């Protein structure tokens, strides 16, 4: 009974979230200089790109080595041909 009510409320939030995000972004675009908005967006893109590179070249090889016993050299050589997925 309680689970159904919680799921119903979560469904409302999921359906209303895009409208709220659109309203927040509209308010931001209306009140912030275009140059500042573009600069912050460029900074955000740079941070996401950098974090993705760190994840791809530092954390994933470390986890593959420690948890899976796959050395980073083998991981990077197999990554291009995706041989690691079939176990070869």
Image (cartoon, helix red, strand yellow):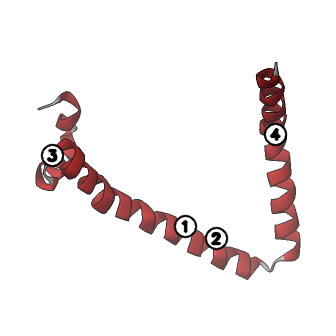
Quarter that holds the N terminus: top right
Q: Indicate which label's residue lies in the foreground, 2 or 4.
A: 4
Quadrant location of residue 27? bottom right
Tag 3: Cα neighbours inside 10 Å, few (<14), some, or many (≥20)?
A: some
Residue 41, numbered circle: 2
Residue pushed farthest front?
A: 2
List the residue tagged with mark 3: 70
Residue at image point 72% right, 81% down = 35
Q: CA distance from mark 1 to mark 3?
A: 31 Å
Marks 1 and 2 in Cβ contact (< 8 Å): yes
Q: Which element carries disc 2, helix, strand or loop?
A: helix
Q: Mark 1 = which residue?
A: 45
Instruction: Give the distance between the C-alpha atoms of the residues marked 2 and 4, in whole angstroms.
Output: 26 Å
Secondary structure of residue under mark 1:
helix
Q: CA distance from mark 4 to mark 3?
A: 42 Å
The image's mark for residue 13 is 4
User: Which of marks 3 and 1 precedes in the sequence?
Assistant: 1
Q: Quadrant of residue 68?
A: top left
Q: Residue at x 12, y 48 (%)?
A: 74
At mark 3, the secondary structure is: loop
Q: Nearer the viewer, mark 4 or mark 1?
A: 4
48 relative to 79, above or below: below
- Number of other residues with Cα within 10 Å of mark 4, as a class: few under 14, some 14 to 19, many 20 or more: few
Task: Decide which of 85, 42 is in the foreground and name it.
Answer: 85
| CA–CA distance in space, label 4 to label 1 | 27 Å
Question: Which residue occupies 18% across, 48% down?
Answer: 75
Q: CA distance from mark 3 to mark 2?
A: 37 Å
């Amino acid at each position: 009974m309680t689970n159904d009510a919680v799921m119903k409320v979560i469904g409302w939030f999921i359906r209303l979230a895009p409208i709220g995000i659109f309203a927040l972004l509209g308010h931001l675009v209306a009140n912030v200089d275009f140059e500042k908005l573009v600069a912050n967006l460029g900074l955000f893109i740079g941070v996401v790109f950098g974090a993705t590179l760190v994840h791809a070249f530092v954390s994933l090889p470390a986890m593959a080595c420690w948890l899976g016993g796959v050395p980073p050299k083998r991981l990077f050589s197999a990554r291009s041909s995706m041989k690691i997925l079939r176990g070869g």
